[in-house]
Image (tube, rainbow, N blue to C red):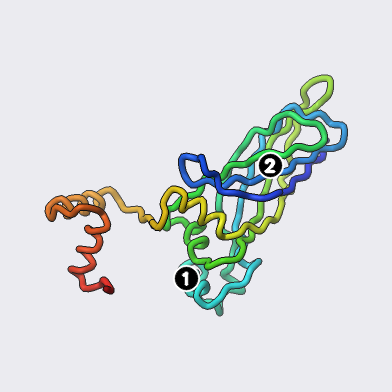
C-alpha cells in the first residue's frame, strides 16, 4: 500500500471565483519512488472552536451556537464547514495542489455564524482526507486513501472576510421561505419602495424597532 501524508501550506481568498471561495494549498506526499497516476481526493473541513480563546464580545455572539460560556466545557463541539473534492494530477514523491472551497454567506449556516462572531485572530480547522489513488509504475493499481489522514491548520479570520467582501462588501444575507418572500415583495411593490433596504427599514420603523 502507498503511504500518503498531507500538509496545508496556506489558504487565500480567490479573487476570480464566481462566488466567495477559499483556496487551500495542499502538499501531498506519497511513498518515495511510487508513481501516482492520479488521486481522486475528498476533504472534509471542520471548525474546532475549542482550540482558541474568545473575548466577551465574541462569546456573546456565539451564544446561539454554544450557549452561555459556563456550558462551553460540554457544548463547544466541532462545526462542519465544507466537504469538497478535487482531482490531483499525476506525480512521483510530492506535489502541491489547490483545493477550492466555496463559502456560503447564509447566516442560517452554523459555520457562517461562527466566522461572523469572531473579531480577529485565527480559525482552528481540521482537514480530514479520504479518496482513491491510481498508482503503479507498470500499470494501474487502485488504492484507498485511509480515513485517518488529517491535518490541523489555523486560518486567519480576515481571509474568510476577504473572500466574502470581494463579492458582497458591507452586506449580510438572510434566507426566507418563498411565501414570506412573496409577501415581502408585495409589501415593497404596494409602497413603491426603491430597495430591499428601504423595505426592511420601513417595516422596522412601523414596528418602532429601528435605532436612529
**Residue 161 drawn above or below residue 35:** below
Name the N-terminal-most of marks 2 and 1: 1
Per the image, label 1 sits on a secondary structure element best described as: helix
**Residue 35 drawn above or below residue 117:** above
Relative to residue 165, is residue 202 drawn left or right?
left
Question: At 32% across and 53% down in the image, what residue appears?
Answer: 176
Task: Point out the residue furthest to the bottom here.
Answer: 70
Question: At 26% across and 54% down in the image, what residue appears?
Answer: 196
Task: Point out the residue furthest to the left here.
Answer: 190
| Residue 61, numbered label | 1
| Marks 2, 1: nearer the viewer | 1
Residue beneath label 2, please?
130
| Residue 50, numbered label | none
Contact check, label 2 and label 1, Cβ < 8 Å: no
The picture quadrant where one finds residue 157 is bottom right
Residue 141 placed where, x, y %? 78, 26
Relative to residue 192, is residue 72 drawn left or right?
right
Question: At 50% across and 73% down in the image, what residue appears?
Answer: 67
Query: Real-space Cα distance between discs 2 and 1?
Result: 34 Å
Question: At 17% across and 54% down in the image, what residue appears?
Answer: 193
Task: Point out the residue furthest to the right here.
Answer: 33
Quadrant assignment for the N terminus = top right
**Residue 69 drawn above or below residue 6:** below
Relative to residue 3, is residue 23 drawn left or right?
left
- The number of numbered discs placed on residues in the rendered structure image is 2
Q: Along the line of sight, which residue is nearer the eye, 16 or 9? A: 16
The 10 Å Cα crowd at callout 1, few under 14, some 14 to 19, many 20 or more, is some
The picture quadrant where one finds residue 126 is bottom right
Q: Along the line of sight, which residue is nearer the eye, 106 or 133? A: 106
Residue 68 placed where, x, y %? 51, 76
Quadrant assignment for the C terminus = bottom left
Per the image, label 2 sits on a secondary structure element best described as: strand
Amino acid at each position: 500500500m502507498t503511504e500518503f501524508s498531507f500538509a496545508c501550506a496556506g489558504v487565500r481568498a480567490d479573487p476570480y471565483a464566481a462566488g466567495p471561495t477559499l483556496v487551500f494549498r495542499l502538499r501531498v506526499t506519497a511513498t518515495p519512488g511510487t508513481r501516482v497516476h492520479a488521486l481522486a481526493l475528498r476533504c472534509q473541513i471542520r471548525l474546532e472552536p475549542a482550540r482558541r480563546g474568545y473575548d466577551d464580545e465574541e462569546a456573546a455572539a456565539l451564544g446561539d451556537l454554544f450557549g452561555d460560556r459556563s456550558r462551553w466545557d460540554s457544548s463547544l463541539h466541532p462545526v462542519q464547514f465544507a466537504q469538497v473534492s478535487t482531482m490531483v494530477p499525476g506525480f512521483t514523491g510530492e506535489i502541491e495542489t489547490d483545493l477550492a472551497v466555496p463559502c456560503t454567506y447564509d447566516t442560517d449556516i452554523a459555520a457562517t455564524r461562527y466566522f461572523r462572531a469572531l473579531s480577529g485572530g485565527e480559525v482552528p480547522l481540521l482537514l480530514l482526507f479520504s479518496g482513491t489513488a491510481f498508482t503503479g509504475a507498470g500499470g494501474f493499481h487502485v488504492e484507498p486513501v485511509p480515513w485517518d489522514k488529517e491535518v490541523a491548520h489555523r486560518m486567519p479570520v480576515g481571509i474568510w472576510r476577504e473572500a466574502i467582501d470581494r463579492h458582497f462588501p458591507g452586506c449580510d444575507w438572510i434566507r426566507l421561505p418563498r411565501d414570506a418572500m412573496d409577501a415581502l415583495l408585495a409589501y415593497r411593490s404596494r409602497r413603491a419602495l426603491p430597495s430591499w433596504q428601504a423595505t426592511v427599514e420601513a417595516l422596522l420603523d412601523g414596528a418602532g424597532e429601528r435605532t436612529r
